[in-house]
Image: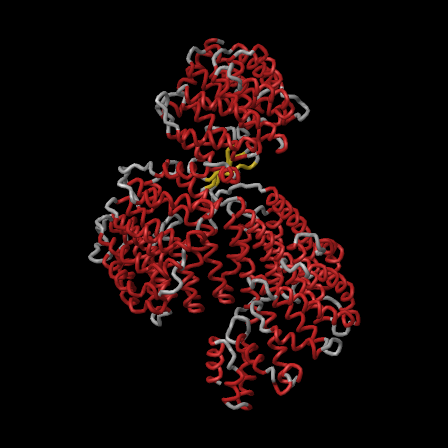
Amino acid sequence: MNENLSEFEDLVKRLLLPDNTVRGKAEEQYYTYLTEDTDSCLTFLLSMINFSEADEVIALSLVLLRRNVVSEFNPFWSKSTEETQNTIHQSLFEEYTKQKRFYFKKLIADILIAIDKKSMTENENKNDEFLIYLFKTIENNSELELQTFMYIIKEMCVYNPQALVTKVGELSELFSNCLSNEVNLNIRSDTTIAICSFIPLLEKENQEEYNILIPLMVDVLWALIENGDQDLAENCLKSIVQLASRTIKPFKKQTKLILEQMLKINETENEKFEIDMPLKLLAVELLITFIETASGVVVETEGFLTRLIQCGIQLLTNIDENEEIDDFDNTKETIVEELSPVSKGGSIIDRISLQLGGEMIVKDIFKLIPDLLGSEFWNYRFAGLRTLEYISEGCRKTMLPELGSIVELVVPMLSDPHFRVCYQAIDTIQEFTVGFCPFLQNDYSDLILPKLIKLFDSESYLMKANVCACLTKYLQKIKNPEPIVDYIASIMDNLLKVFENTNYNSQTKEELIVQEQAISTIAAMSIALKADFLGYYDQIMKLSKAILKEATLDEQRLLCGKTIDCVALIGRATGHESFENDALEVMKIMIDAQENSEINSDDPKLPYILKAWAQIAVVLKEKFVPYLEVLMPLIWEQAGQKIDLIVVDELDTQAQEALIGREVIVFGDKLIGINTTVLISISKALELCYSLVHVLGHHFIQYVDKTLEIVLHLTPCIYDHKIRYYCSLLIPELFNSIVLALKLKTINNLDKNVLDHFFNESIKELYNAVMSESKQDILSSQLEAISDLIEYYGKEGIDEQNIPILIEVIVSEIKDSVQRRELLIQKTIEGEKYVDESGLSGDIILQQDLQEENEIFEALTQIISNLAQNCFQFFYPHFEKLIFPFFNILIKLGNHPINSQYSFSALSSIILYGEQNLFQFYWEIIKENALEWMPHIEQTGVMQAAAYAIGVCAQRAESDQLFKKDAPAIANFIIQTLQAISELENDDDMLLAKDHLISALGKICFYHSQTVPFSELAPVWLQLLPIEKDHKEAQWNIKSLVKYIENNNNVILGENNQNLAKIFQILTFSINTSLLNKESQDQILKLFGQFKNEYQSNQIESLIQDFEQELKEKFVEIWEKL
């Protein structure tokens, strides 16, 4: 036996050797032994504890034994006999009791935890034997047992949490006792870590009870700091930070304490001990969490806010002058690493500004800025500029009135002698171009641009590149090129100089970096100037073609990609007549590159090429179709890539090394590592495909089948929301391509069977996607896709077999959306704050989430409308039985306004497209709830929907006696509501509500002129026009008005045509706007033509004399062209 053990020990030793060949053979021998004689191998691994004298052999044997227990990807523990398993289990219990060394005790405990978890999984009634045993081992208060116990509790929180649920009482008491000052500091430290792992397992209402332990945990932290145990202190604080990121409940009554102590860690300078920067940064991380979750305490506690700001700025000054900048694309990350003091300091300033806003912090910050920017120390000037950059988003509203004085502070820093300060000044201006657009560009270009242009003379290629990057943003955000006209020539001259005398066969890295940025700036300039860029068209096209032909080295691929993109953007922006020929030449270069296999999925120019194809397609339209033959295989190849995944067990730590560099998601007890590069490539290909189908319509028909096959396969992709999003956009566009091709008969052998198959397959995949979707924004796009499919399919398409799954989608999502909205509202009421991965604060996220729920409900009501319009006879019985009961409740006053708003919309669709015998039932519901809701004029959305519903009822109720009886009172009620809102501010929502109220009154007058006092109501309607926002209502009202005039309606025209000036004002306002379609615009022009024949010029001048100047000029221009 000993001889066999010696051989096995030698095998384990060889597994530890650094020589790859020797170790590889040992691994093969070990695996063969494990496979052929599992029981003996597992038993030998256990025996090494007592047989071997080498610690490293014992440790590896225990690690291998644990791996065989925990990993579900190898079957060896399950293959072993029950006798072997019981022997190992019992022996480990005994070894755990005897073991006096903490490290080995931990390794043994890990195996016992894993074994017990497996046993409890297989038999849910079985107790955790090891946990029961552990509580007995600590009764003697042995320090080793207590320390190991806390380690095990921490591990069990991750790997076997259900076992701890029954021990809450005992653990709480033990935690409290182990944090006392009398206990060994190492045990107190391990207890702190265990508590932080344990609390999130509890129900939220029970987590707050642990607030009494927070001060004790902070005491432990300070004891470790003062004792010089920085590593242990870091571990403790890291656990506290992780706890706060998971739940804030236990900290609620200790917020001031935490803020004070974390600030103290950053402020402390003590001769006896020094606090390391990593520990300070952890304290900052906790501060950031509390800024986001307890901003009220920050504001209310005197001095906290000022100290937080000072802490953030002080960290910003902690920048190393000598750090090298290796690559422009990663400049900021190189200058300021993500976990550096500068980054953390910036996070404090950024989060404070986003959470509290300018009114709370700008005053304090601007007391410091002048001294910072005027400091003799470059790092303080840097900190001042970086602070301005970070607060510009959250404090925009407060900073905007003072923008001039702020710009005057920043611009001189563009001439700062220190490289990093000057570089940061460019970054700050760049951030301002986004945050203060368009005011910065409109009002301060004369201050900013000369200084930026001068920096083209810098000897630093990075400075030049950063100037280009800044100008690119500056130009992308410009609304009107007039403020930059005087600088265009200088900017373009400097950009073109960047490319002069370049030998692309021996191009330096520095030249390449600057040119990559400069070509993007040229593209941005073309977009900003549009047709005014034509003077540079020929020169830039010549340059671009030269780059594409000569820059053939691997490192020049990004430059070529950006150049291709630049060419496409210039062509689209300028509309140059010769662009078609230039585009063809550039596309030939792209095709040659593809055919020569120069492009692969990780090619940096690929995203630009794909984007360029789309831009060129927009310009060339149907002339682009021949190039689909070359382009679509590339898109299919990109979109059809196999998603690169690695799946490992969450307990298999060695296998997890393969996850490095991948995005990791947790799925049950598995970790899935995803190659995100592939996902990005797929989503970009789908985005391009969507652009092409959208632009080309039925011309895309030959490529629909293959594209649809890929898209339907990707629709349920759980690994990337962008892929799901573009699939939901593509499906209805592809469907519409077939519909249009059928109508236009553009291809042979295409019939309705193809459409039926497409619809059925698409609905099935979208149904599965909707029912499993967790992201609200994607869910709304998927529901919109279903709605679009129904709309495009039309009345002859949908049959009864499709209805049940569509009804299931509607019912399920109405329930879920209402519940989600209630939860979000409750969070808002409770003031619960949180921050998502993008860094947005809780309030902003809650508003975004609520908006997404609105979009979901809107999509659901649109599905209902399209089903009612296209297959009412199949749809209505399901609606009446399964959907109407929800809306009959949600429409009532007291529900959330959004729920009521879309209930009105849904019932309007039933009235609009339903049978006449249903009218009275639904009118009573609409009338009762509209009368209750509409006095609540602050609820503009409900008011709009209720008014629309009344208008629909008026339109559909020409012969209904009940409506005729109600019509006069309803009309007066609408007028009263319009009077009530007349003094309120006209934002977009209010304008839409007004439009629908006016239109409802107009429909009552138009369809029920014999029932209501038309001579009183119609003039009121006329004076309330024009419709300002809603194009559908605008078209109906203009058509009705024109019809009245054509019929010489005396009430509308007024006595002696006294209302003609008002009529001209309404028609002039509405024509040549997006409100009206061509038919309505032509009606107005025809009417104006008739008036021109009937009236003298002086009469017309008299009619328009009271028009506002802009409206008068518009009328005169139209009149003169008649």
x, y percent for residue 232: 44, 23
Image check: 782 left or right of 1004? left
x, y percent for residue 1058: 60, 84
Residue 743 in view (yes/no):
yes
940 relative to 61, above or below: below
Image check: 926 left or right of 1062? right
Q: Which of these two is toward me, 768 or 1060? A: 1060
x, y percent for residue 1092: 53, 88
User: Which quarter of the picture shows residue 917?
Assistant: bottom right
Colour mapping: secondary structure
User: Which quarter of the picture shows residue 904?
Assistant: bottom right
Spot the residue most to the left: 501
Residue lying at 62% horizontally and 20% vertically, measured from the top left: 170
705 relative to 663, above or below: below
Q: Which of these two is toward me, 548 or 958? A: 958
Image check: 255 left or right of 405? right
Image check: 158 left or right of 907? left
839 relative to 206, above or below: below
Q: How many marks?
A: 0
Residue lying at 71% horizontally and 55% vertically, measured from the top left: 893
Q: Which of these two is toward me, 305 or 341? A: 305
Residue 33 in view (yes/no):
no
Q: Which of these two is toward me, 151 or 874? A: 151
x, y percent for residue 399: 42, 52
